[in-house]
Image (cartoon, rainbow, N blue to C red):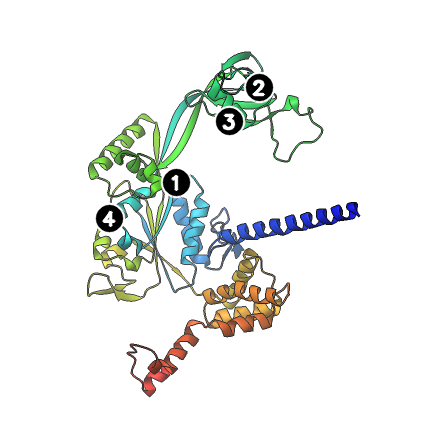
Amino acid sequence: PTRSAQGEREKMAEGGEGVKVAEIKDLTRIERIGAHSHIRGLGLDDALEARKVSQGMVGQVNARKAAGVILQMIREGQIAGRAVLLAGQPGTGKTAIAMGMAKALGEETPFAMMAGSEIFSMEMSKTEALTQAFRKAIGVKIKEETEIIEGEVVEIEIDRPATSGAAPKMGKLTLKTTEMETVYDLGQKMIESLDKEKVSAGDVITIDKASGRITKLGRSFARSRDYDAMGAQTKFVQCPEGELQKRKEVVHVVTLHEIDVINSRSQGFLALFAGDTGEIRPEVREQIDMKVAEWREEGKADIVPGVLFIDEVHMLDIECFSFLNRALENDMAPVLVVATNRGITKIRGTNYKSPHGIPIDLLDRLLIVTTQPYTERELRLILDIRCEEEDVEMTEDAKDLLCKIGHETSLRYSIHLITAAALVAHKRKSAEVEVEDISKVYSMFLDVQRSTQFMVEYQDQFMFNEVPVDDDAMEV
């Protein structure tokens, strides 16, 4: 009886663990899904020709080709102060193209994103907010030489006192390369660092002499037969050659804005984490620009012009547009990419109308890229990608219906229905989303057209209604 009870407990423990793991997995999965989390690049080949479906991008062939050309110009780093306008209807992939550009540029090139309305909600002047955004998009590649000790650990001896705190820990570390072997005395801090990194005999390590930081490169090939089984993460490397002490060039990429903040605030780089950077004085920026120019001349640093993406650019006012005109002429300007879904509309801060709500003099500086509405076939491909991204199993009939809904209403509305339909299917214990689930959520959640129709029909029952009740209004 005791054994069977124990077996039951073990089963329950196993079952409990299984549930826990599944829950954790689902949570991390949901956290990573965003509106554009499926985008991994622009989906171009080496000749900058757009593939039909690649890296999460579908359709918009001409717009993606144009973005590829701009990308090539940014990579070469020869141009500054160029500006590109992505113009198109809502839901035609403008932000997706900008995200694709960011992913294609990689980690080295700074890419700053902001919405036009953010400028008005910051506790600083509009021009200061734009200046900070510009300087976030300009990287400085700083090269510096550091002295390191690199070798294979032969032996670590640590004398630990019998009672803790009675005396400091002492120790010796023996390192070797293919040509030499040296014994180093270890202090308290180095012993703690070695313990933290779990360094043992046979590891190949580097020690930064300036900071004392220890980095484990992997296990030596000579020790590969020490154990019968190794973890998948175990990496084997050759024993270093030459002398133990070497000079190594390290490259850091920081943005001009980060340098500004560190030099302008009393708490230094901590202000970067606090987020409260405040207004930065022009004198500080001038000194930093002069210092960066010196480093460039000495060959210590290179400028990496990045990309500043401003979404909903029509939300900027005439003062911001005037500032952009001037800022783009600066030789330290990044490539500016702006997006808007407006037609001919008023320029904010004036009574004048202009295409996209942007003044004509700034429009003249922009390379304009247009996005076209998606075809029904492209909508279907996008919905397939989103179902895969959101981990939703859906029947072909349900996908066809969802595609039809997307074509008649909007792409965004049909994408929103995916997870809602999956929850409805889950509730009726089905592994796949079927047509009835799509129909149910379609009746639950209204799209813009049906919502507008409802408003027109019942407008007299709403508060502060200003639409006159007559036949013409009903037809609209």
Q: Which residue is disc 3 drawn over?
A: 215
Instruction: In the rendered view, tell whether residue 444 sits above or below residue 111.
Output: below
Residue at left 55%, top 66%? 421
Q: What label does residue 153 carry, if any?
A: 2
The amino acid pointed to by label 1 is: Glu
Residue at left 23%, top 56%? 361
Q: Is 103 left, or right, of 195 in this rendering?
A: left
> Which residue reaches farthest front?
1
Q: Compute the Cα span from label 2 to label 3.
A: 12 Å
10 Å neighbourhood of mark 2: few (<14), some, or many (≥20)?
Answer: many
Q: Secondary structure at mark 2?
A: strand
Whether the residues at callouts 2 and 3 have beta carbons within 8 Å, the answer is no
Q: Earlier in the sequence, mark 4 or mark 1?
A: 1
10 Å neighbourhood of mark 4: few (<14), some, or many (≥20)?
Answer: some
Q: Compute the Cα span from label 3 to label 4.
A: 42 Å
Q: Which residue is disc 1 drawn over?
A: 76
Give 447 or 297, whichever is nearer the viewer.
Answer: 447
